[in-house]
Image (cartoon, helix red, strand yellow):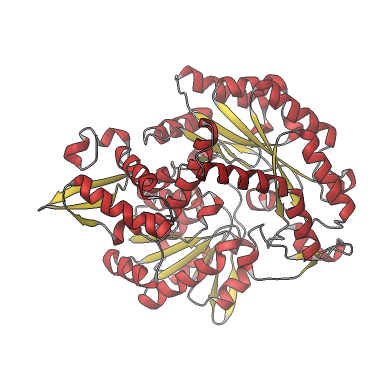
Amino acid sequence: MKIALIAPPYPLEEAPSPPLGISYVAAACEKAGAQVRIFDYIVRQYSPEKLEAEIKDFDPDVVGTTSVTMNYKKAAEILCLAKKIKPSLITLFGGPHVSFDIENTLTNYPGTDIVVIGEAEQTLAELIPVLCLRDQWKTINGIAFRENGEIIRTHERPLMENLDYLPLPARHLLPMSRYQALGFPVSIITSRGCPNKCIFCLGRKMVGFKVRYRTTQSVVDEIENILAYGIDIINIADDLFTADKTRVREFCGELKKRGLRFQWSAFARVNTVDLDTLKVMKDAGCHAVSFGIESGNTEMLKRVRKGITLDQARDAATACKEAGIIAHASFLAGLPGESIETLKDSDRFSKELDILYGYHFLAPFPGTTVREHAQDYDIEILSDDWDLYDADHVIVRTSHLEPQEIKDFVEKATSKVKTDWDDLDRRFKENKTNETEYLQIAGYYRMLMIYKVLSEDLIEKNAIQTGDFDQALTSLSRIIADQSHLEMDFTRHQIKDLIQKTYIRFEDKQGKIRFFWSHNNKSSEFSSQKKSGSLN
């Protein structure tokens, strides 16, 4: 059986790492004996024509996709188009949005045959052997489908207890060199589950309240596999990495035992860290920890069942500074009952902590308590346009605040950051930055260039250039500089760097140079760069 899995478009500005969910699904499909291919439209431009060409080339029996809320509509659209291109396809849709929006998905997107609910790996192991036997679908727990005009939902599937059952994510099926060019951390999980009850979060409902752990051996084996790509920045994407401090120390000890040195970050809660644990993490390579603090108002924290105190946040920020770890705090604006006073409390508290911080707007996702019981809270949800559920749009009001007031407050609260950045940008263009400032803003413009190159397939569209290598590189760089509105010398330097790192390769074809992305850039695969088509 051939299975094509689609990674639907996702804003590059949201700093995507190689998609972990679809990689786990791909690995589960391979383990079930399927031939699998991932159509990645995150770091490649999507078009209906490209989808049709790739379906015709691979000729799959099954097409599946996953999404979060913000790219749900696009994922559904692509899945339905795949069904039109090849009507005999069986189509699968999974992920956190569809798991809590089953009826809408199967009713409004008839190209979807089966919704896979919640954790997909064990479900797919049982489903794939009977996919062509429709009368057997009812025997598979954890799915939903249409039958005779009705929506059938099978029994709920228990969460898997042994996470070491999971095969390693199938990153070998992803265009890893493109993600490496972006430079964002690669995400892993060491556990699933969240014991907390925040009313705006899906974690507990999606992966359960009981934290289930992978063995440290399995996690560090995966890290070694990631490092083999030449990647040296990893993010631990657990809902709560620091839930068990003994296990954190065990993990850090295994990294040191194997001599693995790389930078890594993690998500934590302010009530689960202490100075000694953070020092152990720092010694093992942890450089940053992110905390969801959400509000600087005590009553607000109680209302949203955050389960933390402001003093715990203060202690966590202080401990990170002492340990030499960068701390980042996330605040939510537009929570139930939000008022100018509660927002001012968040503004004061964010500045008091004296750490990096940022604001997002509340997005009441399907399945969250705040959405399912909105009538019990001081909140009105103004839109079900899922495209707006990116935490960058205000889609709620409270009895105290209109959407524009919430937006205006956040813009004012973060105005100094923007002013400082604009000043840095001006000095950069006037060649008046110091070395650290130059690297900071040059990195930003490099990122904008790579966004453009990836999202518009600029390497593929301009792959063939005439002349020797230097002439071809100059021609390609000029095209990209014009498209990105960047200086030519800067662009040429960045493209050459991507080639030196073997993310982009080239070959001489009868006096013409062809540039192309490496597909799977494991460092051991490229022993002779010149022969394989890259640059010394």
Question: Measured from the top left, where is residue 54 in percent x and y?
Answer: 32, 65
**Which quadrant of the structure image shows residue 357?**
top right
The foreground one among 151 and 97 is: 97
Please give left or right for residue 505 compared with residue 481 in the image. left
When the figure is inspected, residue 264 is found, relative to residue 507, above or below; the finding is above
Question: Measured from the top left, where is residue 205 in percent x and y?
Answer: 68, 53
Residue occupying the point 82% across, 50% down = 304
Question: Measured from the top left, where is residue 36 in percent x and y?
Answer: 35, 55
Residue occupying the point 40% across, 78% down = 84
User: How many labels, in total?
Assistant: 0
Q: Quadrant of the C terminus?
A: top left
Can residue 40 be seen in the rendering of this structure? no
The foreground one among 475 and 184 is: 475
Q: Quadrant of the N terminus?
A: bottom left
When the figure is inspected, residue 213 is found, relative to residue 31, above or below; the finding is above
Residue occupying the point 54% across, 82% down = 148
Give the farthest residue toward the left: 510
The foreground one among 353 and 18 is: 353
